[in-house]
Structure formats: structure tokens, C-alpha cells
Amino acid sequence: MTALYASRLTKVRAQMQTQHVDALVVSVGFDLPYLVGYHAMPLERLTALVVTADRATLVVPRLEAPRVEHHPEVFDIVAWNETEDPVAITAALIGSAQRIAIGDQMWSRFLVEMLPRLSGRHFVRSVEIVGPLRIRKDAAEMAALAAAGAAADRVAAQLQRGDIPLVGRTEAQVSADI
């Protein structure tokens, strides 16, 4: 997986350079797991991946850090404590970047708190950077999609044949059979 995430970040950096974006910041949503494999919980605490030309850093609440499968060759982790300001940490990682791509699913409160710290900067949507890359699937992604489709087809066939009794059972009970 390390090579996969490293490759994706290399492609993101190339897109950033093409579009004259100095920093990319993504939070909850689809881009974060695509880029580093971490599915952030949509909490009131900031989780953000900051990507620049030479560094990728995941800013994550210390309580969530154990959930991260860390790939140190690909990205750094800054785990923040309750008494720390994650917006300040994120803004410091953005540094002097002038054109910043922000993730569509990042909570607005974090962006609103970041704006005064990054005054005079130009903001764009991260979908312009990551979206075109996520659309194109590599061989591994195609194989995973085919496997998921085949599994769904098997379950649908079992349901149609009546192989999985449903009446009077909970979803958890039915799932245990599959």
C-alpha cells in the first residue's frame, strides 16, 4: 500500500504544479482515504492532510492517531492534544503557500478559523486537483471493484434463490450468514 499512496501523492503534486497550487488540504471525505488510506471520523476535531511540493503531513487528534495506518515513507503524522490548536498547526504546515486547494468536505468552521491566519491567499477546491485522478482507476482498483461486484452478485443470487432466510431476522443476523 505504501507504493500506492506514494504514487497517488506524486500524481497529486504533479497536478498541483500544473494548476499552480502550492498546498492541498483535505479532511473528512473521499480524498483523504484515497491519498493516505485513512478514513477520518467526522468529528468536531480537525483531521487534515496537508500536501506541499516536498511534504505530506496528516494532522490528527491524538485520540485518533492509533487508527492511522502510518506509512512514514509517504506522510508524516502530527498528533495534536486537546490543549493544542490544530488550525494553527495546519496553517503552519501550509506555510507561505499562496494558492491553496481545500477539500470540499472539510468542515467550514475549520476553514473560517484558518482564513485570518492565511490572509491574502487564494483558495480553490481540491476536487480540481484530486478529482481527475480519482476518476481514473488502475489495475488494482479495477480488480477490487470487480471483486466487490462479484460478491454483491453472489449475495443477490442467494437472496433470489431463498438461500438466505430473511423473515423475522435482524440485519445483523442475516449479515452473519453471508
Image (cartoon, rainbow, N blue to C red):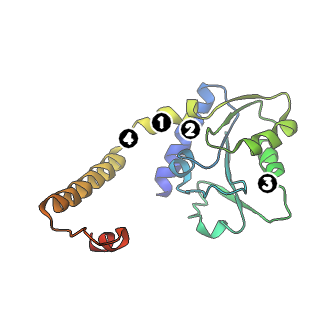
Amino acid identity at mark 2: Val
Residue tagged 3: 86
* Front: mark 1 or 3: 3
Left or right of 118, for residue 45: left
Secondary-structure class at tag 2: helix
* Front: mark 2 or 4: 4
Left or right of 165, for residue 118: right
Q: Nearer the viewer, residue 147 or 52?
A: 147
Extreme residue in the left direction: 161
Label 1 Cα neighbours within 10 Å, binned few <14 / some 14-19 / many ≥20: some
Q: Look at the picture and state if 169 lies above or below 96.
A: below
Q: Look at the picture and state if 102 lies above or below 27.
A: above
Q: Are marks 2 and 4 in contact (CB under 8 Å)?
A: no
Amino acid identity at mark 3: Pro
Residue tagged 1: 133
Q: Are marks 3 and 4 in contact (CB under 8 Å)?
A: no
Question: Of label 3 and label 4, which has the lower sequence position?
Answer: 3
Q: Are marks 1 and 2 in contact (CB under 8 Å)?
A: yes
Q: Are marks 4 and 1 in contact (CB under 8 Å)?
A: no
The percent position of residue 36, horizontal first and vertical second, equals 55, 53
Q: Nearer the viewer, residue 78 or 45?
A: 45
Left or right of 74, for residue 45: right
The percent position of residue 42, horizontal first and vertical second, equals 63, 55
Residue tagged 4: 137
Write down the quadrant of residue 52 in the picture: top right
Label 3 Cα neighbours within 10 Å, binned few <14 / some 14-19 / many ≥20: many
Residues at marks 2 and 3, CA–CA distance in whole angstroms:
24 Å
**Mark number, residue 12:** 2
